[in-house]
Image (spheres, grey):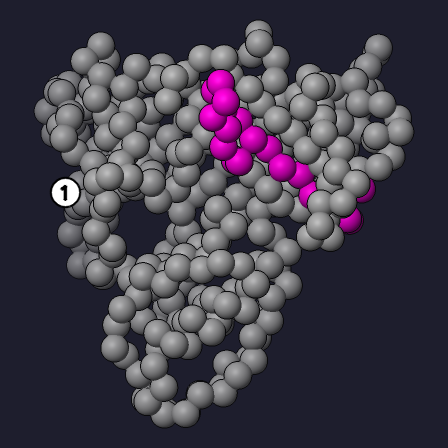
Amino acid sequence: MRLYNRKAELVVYANDGTQAQAVDLSGLDFSFTVTAKLPERKNKKNKTNPVLATVDVMKLSETTRNKIKASDTGVKISFGYGDEMFEMFEGPVVNIVNEYSAPDWTTKIFAKHAWEAYKESYFSRSYKKDASVKAIINDVAGSFGLPFVNHYDGTATLLAGTVFDGESKDVMDKLAGDYGLSWEIAGNTVTVTDVYNPPLVDRTRVAVLGPSILSGPIIEESLVNEKKRNEKVVRRIRVTSMLLPYIYPGVPIQFKDPLFRRQYSNIATRKLRDADDNAIYIVDEVTHRGSSMAKDQCVTEIITKEERL
């Protein structure tokens, strides 16, 4: 991708699934922040992190301000370079704040990706003994009303007849805890992964960060306490680049830029070393900061998953 002639687009629409009465605000001055993080797994429980977006729109007319209501409005943010555009976020608005600072208004829009599906989906069904866990996962994932990908290929079956009844996210959390799974809603898709047998990295999908890097990558090592007082070294990488709209949690990345030194902070020697150019890292957390205004810098801040060494 050629990283010049950048373009940002913003559309607000009626949140009824039809995008009727859409209002294109791309011609106005606006800035946005989109944050996303892989689900966290602690004590055999999942904490799914919705994708969040904040948009500041300047000089919005009173008529348009009155059209945007948090209860029935969705927002779509796209970003790209030249003619190559990527949809970075689409989801319902959860709050709107209009602020006046003479001489103009600023409208702050807060939205959560797939939040309605996550918050309002319900699942109730009974299964007999020996029912396939994989089939049950497919059923629960389908209840969100979103596309889903199931990377769990286990052969586990129920040891006894079971009734699942509750919010879909809670049922999925229970299955994740019982069978060693991780799940998330990102990119408008429900994804289920086997923690102990994750899918192989598709090297054709690896995003290579080269001249786009603005600072880093800094490789951080730290100690964590494991069970039985064992200490393990964990490593994660932080890097800031020009805004790369196709980077999101779970994407494999690689660093290939001889102009930047890989700062490797080793906890034992406190020395800086070069990182492995061939290593592939999985994005854990990403923050995109963009703008339609040429004077503003647009960046992507990336943190990779912790790796135990």
Locate the C terminus by quadrant: top left
Q: Position of residue 128 (x, y in %)?
A: 41, 92
| Span of residues in magenta | 69-88
| Residue with the mark numbered 1 | 309
Q: Is residue 173 above or below residue 219?
A: below
Question: What amino acid is at disc 1?
Answer: Leu
Q: Residue at x 23, y 45 (%)?
A: 202
Q: Is residue 75 located in the magenta-colored stretch of the structure?
A: yes
Q: Residue at x 89, y 29 (%)?
A: 63
**Callout count:** 1
Q: Is residue 270 visible?
A: no
Q: Residue at x 49, y 87 (%)?
A: 126
Q: Which quadrant of the view contains residue 127?
A: bottom left
Q: Is residue 309 above or below residue 215?
A: below
Left or right: 108 with respect to 170?
right
| Magenta segment main secondary structure | strand
Q: Residue furthest left?
A: 269
Q: Is residue 102 located in the magenta-colored stretch of the structure?
A: no
Q: Position of residue 308 (x, y in %)?
A: 19, 45
